[in-house]
Image (cartoon, rainbow, N blue to C red):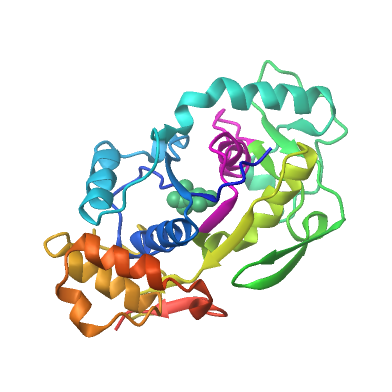
Amino acid sequence: MFANRYTGRFAPSPTGHLHLGSVYTALASFLDARKNKGLWRLRFDDLDTPRNVSGATTSILKTLETLGLYWDGEIDYQSLHLGEYHDVLSDLLRNGEIYRCQCSRKNLTPIYAQICRQKTISTTTSYSLRLKTDSRQLIFTDNLQGEISQNLATQHGDFILKRRDNIIAYQFAVVLDDIRQGVNNVVRGIDLLDETPKQIFLQNVLKLPTPNYFHVPVLANSNGQKLSKQTLAAAVNLTAPNLVLFQLLNLLKQKPPMELQMANVNEILKWAVEHWKVTLLKGEKMIYLD
Ligand code: GLU
């Protein structure tokens, strides 16, 4: 089902500007795709509508363009595919792989106690849809982080594919999105490593292939906090995009030569593609900014 050609992607959520941590991941994924003469797709993960921020898409595109990170093909938006997600959910429900759940968040234990698995829940009230997990040991090898092993039933429990407010959950959407875009190499932040076994489990249930995964470290500020919207990470400063790329290459441990910082964006990216070695990041989980 996968195309032979390496296909990677960047999938930002339009919830604000890109900060240094997000472009760090974008650059890693871009370089890995280009080094492998692959395609690099762009998708906006825009299903969580209450979190979307107007103007974020434009600002994200401007940042990518200023840094010379051009994508291949059409930009995809999850919101264009609501029918597809709901169709697959209907199939899963018919096959008994998922079930309706009416538990409210305040009654939940960290590992869902499967209270609604055996209940018949009326469709006239709001409900979430949960996937039945089992206790098989899910093992995969992350190209950077090594072997990861998880037992979903005991470590996460039955998880949600559609929320009670009808929003399609990230875990589920991402599996269908990556297939739709032909993605066979996922390079993203290590904060999503723990979510990956759920996605692999879903791929198994849906009989879909599993892409290769690389989870790159996340950037942390001087207080040791991951750069994120919650920690109020600033937008990438675009006044000198060459310096931003140079800094990112250092943070990606690529050892760019000093004189490269004065080159233009295209020259820097050309150097970076030629010299890209993801293995230089092996074993790193967090990279601290001074
Ligand atoms: N949209 C997700 C985020 O911004 C990324 C999803 C993914 O890379 O799988 O965190």
Q: In this view, does 154 lie to the left or right of 4?
A: right
Q: In the depicted view, which residue is nearer to us: 193 or 71?
A: 71
Q: Is residue 249 left or right of residue 65?
A: right
Q: How many marks?
A: 0
In the displayed structure, 84 sits above or below 236; it is above
Residue 179 in the magenta stretch? The answer is: yes
Q: Which part of the image, by quadrant, shows the C terminus? A: bottom left
In the displayed structure, 286 sits above or below 41; it is below
Residue 21, can we see it?
Answer: yes
In the displayed structure, 261 sits above or below 177; it is below
Q: Residue at x 52, y 76 (%)?
A: 285
Q: Which residue is drawn at 35% across and 69% down?
A: 272
Q: Which residue is drawn at 56% across and 47% down?
A: 5
Residue 49 % position (x, y): 42, 33
Residue 11 % position (x, y): 45, 46
Q: In the depicted view, which residue is nearer to us: 259 or 129?
A: 259
Residue 10, can we see it?
Answer: no
Residue 200 % position (x, y): 71, 50
Q: Which part of the image, by quadrant, shows the N terminus? A: top right
Q: Which residue is drawn at 33% across and 73% down?
A: 249
Q: In the depicted view, which residue is nearer to us: 38 or 58?
A: 38
Q: In this view, does 148 lie to the left or right of 144?
A: right
Segment tinted magenta in the rendering: 162-187
Residue 33 % position (x, y): 47, 56
Q: In the depicted view, which residue is nearer to us: 203 or 276?
A: 276
Outermost residue, left side: 239
In the displayed structure, 80 sits above or below 61; it is above
Residue 154 in the magenta stretch? The answer is: no
